Image: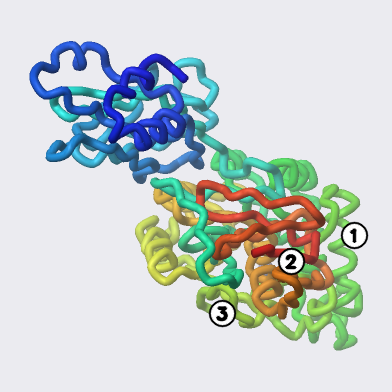
Amino acid sequence: MNRKCKVNFAVPALLAVLLAGCSAGGGAVHDPGVLAGAVGTPAAAPVLALPASVKVQEGVTATFLMPSATLAAGRSATWSISGTDAARFKIDAATGALSFRQAPDTARPADADAHNGYDLVVKASDGQRGTQAPLKVLVLPWNDGGAAGLPLPLVAREVARPAGTTGRPGLRVLDWAGFKAAVSYTFDDSQPSQIEHYPELKAQRVRVTYYINPAGNRYPNYDATWKDAVAQGSEIGNHTTHHCRAAELTDNDSNTCPAGLGSAGAEFDDTDNYIRTNIGQSAVWTMAYPFGDTDYKAAASRFLVARGVWPGMTAPGTASDALNLPITGFPGDPSTPGGDPVSTFNTAVDKALGRGRWMIYLFHTVLPAPTQNWGGGEDIGVITGNMVYAKSFGTMWIDSVVNIGAYWRGQQLLQAATPSTSGGVTTWRWTLPANFPAGRKLRVVVDGGALEQNGTPLSWDRHGYYEVSLDAQSLRWTR
Ligand SMILES: [Zn+2]
């Protein structure tokens, strides 16, 4: 019990709320200067509800924290910040809405000790008395947690664990891991300009998917680039070794696909083998059809999801065709050498957020492409500018096709599972399909009670969910 909390024991009616404030607020301190200046009625000082620390993904410019204060009757709070890194933030004096002045970048930390942990002090004043508390803001890179990591959705207010009222689990899986929408950046053909612009793409620290054709491994830095992409958490996907049309593989015409391996399955298996052996990715889970040719029927038994080229977006939790995911594609207008402007891509982000859908971009040549321009190019600044835009909201899940695809299909699995109930315990069981990546999680909510997997209780996350391991293939709820 700290001294400042003890002082307030003189006001018994407020004891409970003050105790709550003292424990929840951590290092809350009532401003002694303001306290000393108060004369007349000894009104209670504001009580802050403020976490000791918050984690946010880099790039966010939206409000990431809305603190609250309990005030004496008839008073309103004025919010302010101070402390070591306060200059990097702005706070709305009336609402307390806290945000970064400039999007934080983990590669260029702007906090005083350059550890991506920003220290500030948040204060609420009612005009007579003030209360302040320290806050640490931890900024995470988008590829935090490696290939199977799940980013954190922006939650400005701590989400309380739902209380049990119905006596039923009321299990629901959050769409898109708690984000409003999702986006994947895919790059086809292992085009040389993608390798040339890899440093700029890497600097975004966004997990993306490169659909490669290993027949192109004569290009400089081929294996080294894809190996580094895997190390950064990105995905290497299968686009077949020789990029032919499916029918050309079996037409016995040496003019159409001279180096083709004779079947779609052989093309897939050769590329899978290349990715595992030469690139070092543990497995291959997703593919993109060359020319969007869905006659590659051998994809069904080999991949969790496959990306087509038809225009559209994917809804959460639905059983739409996992073997022909749509794209939000912009073919790159030949009359505009840099391709479409960033505003076109940013409008697509707005649309996905508005509709709560998963959007997949498809890029080919990345401009400027000094050595090889295969047409349909988009400027690197437009692509990275769109990534910056997507990050700024904190509500858009940016990730590889395998990560979002596994969540999307995992949600379908759990939602389709028929639970069994016995003695107040409800159990869901599911079986992961073939080609499902290991280590993936779902984010779920239940109406009170307790969740566990393999005898281990799941803990509530203040972002508003429990994290369920898909590998466990079962989940128990106790009333
Ligand atoms: Zn292609």
Query: Taking 211 as reference, is 108 left or right?
Result: left
Give the residue drawn at x 50%, y 67%.
Answer: 165
Percent across and percent down for residue 45 are 24, 26
* Residue on which disc 3 sits: 310
**SS state under label 2:** strand
User: Splitting the image into 4 quarters, where does residue 308 fall?
Assistant: bottom right
Label 2 – label 1 distance at C-alpha: 14 Å
Q: Quadrant of ligand 1?
A: bottom right
For the residue marked with disc 3, what is the amino acid? Trp
- Point out which mark residue 203 bears: none
User: Splitting the image into 4 quarters, where does residue 240 fall?
Assistant: bottom right
Residue, far left: 40
* Residue 176 visible in the current orientation: no
**SS state under label 1:** helix
For the residue marked with disc 2, what is the amino acid? Thr
Q: Earlier in the sequence, mark 3 or mark 2?
A: 2
- Point out which mark residue 273 bears: 1
Query: Taking 413 as reference, is 346 left or right?
Result: left
* Residue on which disc 2 sits: 286
